[in-house]
Amino acid sequence: MKARIHRRTLLKGLLGGAAISIGLPPLECFVNANGTAYAGGGTSFPKRFGVFFWGNGVLPARWDPTSEGADYALTPQLMPLAALKSDLTVISASRVLTTNSSPHLSGPAGLFTGDALVGGTVTRPSIDQLLAQEIGGETRFRSLEIGVQRSDQSYSFAGPNQVNPPETSPRAFFNRLFGEGFRMPGETTAVDPRVRLRRSVLDAVGAQAGDLRNRLGASDRVRLDQHLEGIRGLERQIARLEENPPSLAACRRPDAPPEAFPDVDGRPPMSAISHAMADLMAMALACDQTRVFFNMYSQSVNNTLFPGAPAGHHQLTHDEPGEQPMVDAIVRLIMGDLAYFLSALKAVHEGDGNLLAHSIVLCTTDCSLGKSHSIDDYPMLIAGGGGGALATGRHIAARGDNSSKVMLSLLRAMGVRAPEFGVGAGRTTDGLAGLSP
């Protein structure tokens, strides 16, 4: 039986001759069987990775190109992206092979993690967070999560039941990025001396933390590790505040967006919010504040009232008769906002190229045809080539291949030496043919 640990236990150590201590997260050993508490910077251009996600699928007949390779013709739902055709790879006929047990959730869970839901729960980190673990430690923010629809739901997962909620207020996002603590290259604003004192806290308490970890059960060890990693993340941010941002000529402090984006006749101004977020994210990447992001444009099963729509988006995917012209118009509107987002990245010049060319952006949704919730023929666009790591300007028909092959190709293109991606039916050891240059 493991020794009892009090909930007020502190990890203590010395830092610069000063005594310091940090608290512990809530651990199972602090509660009884009922779950209640017991009494008592550089000159090169880095690669970036991001996800642009929208809910409720597409209309495959108006989405999937009919020809392959570089000479494919853009379909009606892809036409808003025409100016970016050379920067895109369209992937059709890929299948999410994990079980389709939950409409609108099984698809993105299987795609982003390579694993099936267990009891309706995502079990593994999403691809953006796998990459944040690999490359996020070099920047002020390990990853940034944003959204357009006002919601705290996302498919960015650090692990089981660990959702990374999106920031959906452009002004709040601006304040986080470019408010107190942000410095342009060359600025010499002094850092609060208390900031320096907080650095290397975990080094000072490391021995005691290791001893405590050996006394905990498996689930509490996970909680402790996550807590300490969160502190490490704060330390990385502090370290970045003590340095100038990278010497990237495009880095600048943007204008602050409006305080609020009020609804118009009961309809949220999705495009206005999306454009504001795009401009801010482009500068966050240009200033190397992060290299990983997740843009949750709209939720699965959302009933957002888009301009001109007589009903909510999800309801229309099921109830609109015939060829669903209103659903088609909504998908094309979303693709227009995606085009603005990608164009904002492309407008950032970096050396002889641009930020989009140095990035990989996975653009996708939660199913193929919204009416049927199909996760066969999964819609995917890859924008940017990751500095030449991926081919662009083509359509690849995957012919039923495992969608995890796309994810593995993206990990490898970002420099991760991943031998495989996914588990069970979602597992693959091969990337998708045609994605490499």
Image (cartoon, helix red, strand yellow):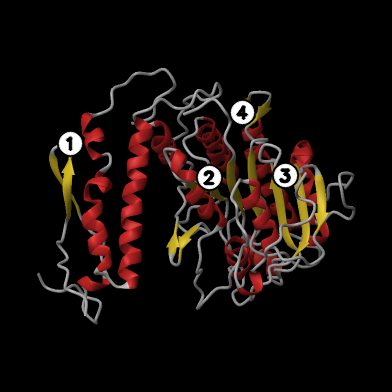
Looking at this view, is 236 or 58 the one in front? 236
| Badge 2 density bin: few <14, some 14–19, many ≥20, Cα 10 Å | many
Q: Amino acid at mark 2?
A: Val
166 versus 276 height, above or below: below
Taking the image as shown, residue 132 lies to the left or right of residue 56, namely: left
Q: Amino acid at mark 1?
A: Gly
Q: Earlier in the sequence, mark 3 or mark 4?
A: 4
Work out how far the residue at label 4 is from the one at label 2, CA to CA, in angstroms: 17 Å
Looking at this view, is 246 or 121 the one in front? 246
Q: Earlier in the sequence, mark 1 or mark 4?
A: 1
Taking the image as shown, residue 120 lies to the left or right of residue 98, namely: left
Instruction: Residue 380: name its quadrant.
Output: bottom right
Work out how far the residue at label 1 is from the one at label 3, CA to CA, in angstroms: 47 Å
Kindly check if marks 1 and 4 are in contact, taking CB atoms under 8 A apart as contact.
no
Work out how far the residue at label 3 is from the one at label 4, CA to CA, in angstroms: 20 Å
- Residue carrying label 3: 390
**Residue 16: which numbered mark, if any?**
1
Secondary structure under the numbered disc 2 in the rendered image: strand
Assign the N terminus to one quadrant of the image. bottom left
